[in-house]
Image (spheres, coloured by chain):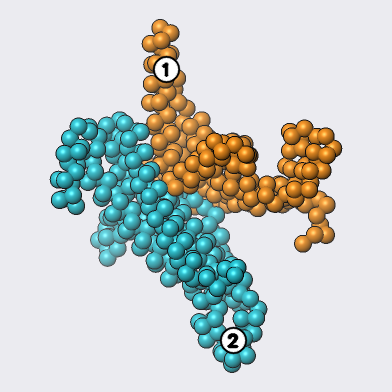
Chain colours: A cyan, B orange
Amino acid sequence: MEQWLTQVAPFLSDNLIFTPNTLAQYWDGLVNTVQLVFISLVVGLFLAVPLAVGRASRRVWLNVPIWLFNYVFRGTPLLIQLYIAYYGFAFIDGVQDSAFAFFINDPVYPALLAFTLNTAAYTTEIFVGAIRATPQGELEAARAYGMSAATAYRRVVLPSAFRRALPAYGNEVIFMLHASAIASAVTITDLTGAAYYVYARFYSPFPAFIFVALVYMLLSFVLQGGFKVLETRMLRHLKPA
Amino acid sequence: MFDFQGYGPRLLEGAWLTAELAVLSLIAALVIGLMVASAKSSRSMTLKSVATVYTTLIRGVPDLVMMMLLFYGGQIGMNMATDGLNAWLGTDMFINVNAFAAGVVTLGVIYGAYMSETFRGAFLAVDAGQMEAARAYGMSPWLAFRRVRFPLMMRHALPGINNNWLVLLKSTALVSIIGLSDMVYVADQATKATHQPFLFMLPVGLGYLAITAVSELVVTGLKRRFDVGFSQAT
């Protein structure tokens, strides 16, 4: 990064706004955004699989609480969830001296908590839809082979559902990338936070925000392309001949 | 218990602002979406490519960045425009960009792009024979749109519009970041002052769920209306 900056510096010498200093600011923002989004997506994905299985089950004590969780997290703005995670623990008496002090002192942790639960809720609904759409014949075939319910889930239902969920999950990933922009509201210097800093420093909204918009767009296109490739590979058997 | 430390009236005002903002942006988004969808299905290559560039750009950029660009940039852009006019006409005008108007315009422009995709799909789902029949009756293009294409298309578009509306409603929370006093903004201020986040954030969350519940009723009514004549099908 340092070396790259010294190489770019001559090209930027005439530019008042995109100095090595502000570019480093944007770079830090990019790193923060990617970390936040990546970690919450991975953890959210791992939470979503058991939640989806529970939500698809016919047991009411299992499926209603998960429905409620999804309803609340999908029905309220992520910003509210972020504020609750950010302020919710900070004002508890004695929290500063407890083992949870790290959670209060760095806004990244509340943001990760809110983003993870939010994406888990959306991903669960995507998976539930895919699980319910499992063709009856696949289930019958699994039963005919003498598979137990658990084995059938592991070997037949889930792999087939994951493939069907792929396009919708790709949208969720892009949605999460865009939603992560609100991390700047709780003082995290993500990409948007960096753009706001540059805007405020130079009072020049157009370069600051258009540049960051292009960065987000590039990230979105890369993700979209990645999912396209994955879809053509994983869903080849569903293509019309 | 529900005195909200004196913030009650301001929270209600904030809720009203959220509802107003959401409904006005929805109308703007529907109008923009219809126009862009028409542009996309037109024969003119210029219109088509402009519409495609617009939707691709909007869908690649976060709402918040778009909002900051239009809100902070809008004032400077407006100043540049009035400065130019002032120098030319020798006047001395200044137009203040209103945060509420900026919010409506931004949300309308963003969700117009999403709506246009919904409308485009719905346009395609209308049987071509219906439009041919309308033309055969001698209807003008506008009359055919109003009497035939629009009512038939809405049946297919309604689920997509409903989804976009629910996302739009939640996106209105972002205007609190650019300083509009919607209910999230009030709750944020109140939390900072009183150190009671749950007292304010939870009711605001419930407020969103309540608006969603009301809109669900409206959508059910509309669905019944646009499904008239199709009850046997499917």
Q: Which of the pair B229/B177 is nearer the observer?
A: B229
The residue sitting at the top extreme is B90
| A156 vs B60: above or below | below
* Residue found at x 43% / y 65%: A44
Residue labelled with disc 1: B82
Question: Going by the image, does B80 lie left or right of B43?
Answer: left
Q: Which of the pair A75/B159 is nearer the observer?
A: B159
The answer to whether residue B172 of the structure is visible from this angle is no
Image position, residue A216 (x, y; %): 38, 48
Q: Are marks 1 and 2 on the same chain?
A: no
Q: Residues within 10 Å of mark 1 (few under 14, many from 20)?
A: some
Residue labelled with disc 2: A142
Image position, residue B186 (x, y; %): 46, 40
| Amino acid at dot 2 | Ala
Read off the chain for label 1.
B
| A178 vs A228: above or below | above
Read off the chain for label 2.
A
Question: Going by the image, does B49 lie left or right of A143?
Answer: left
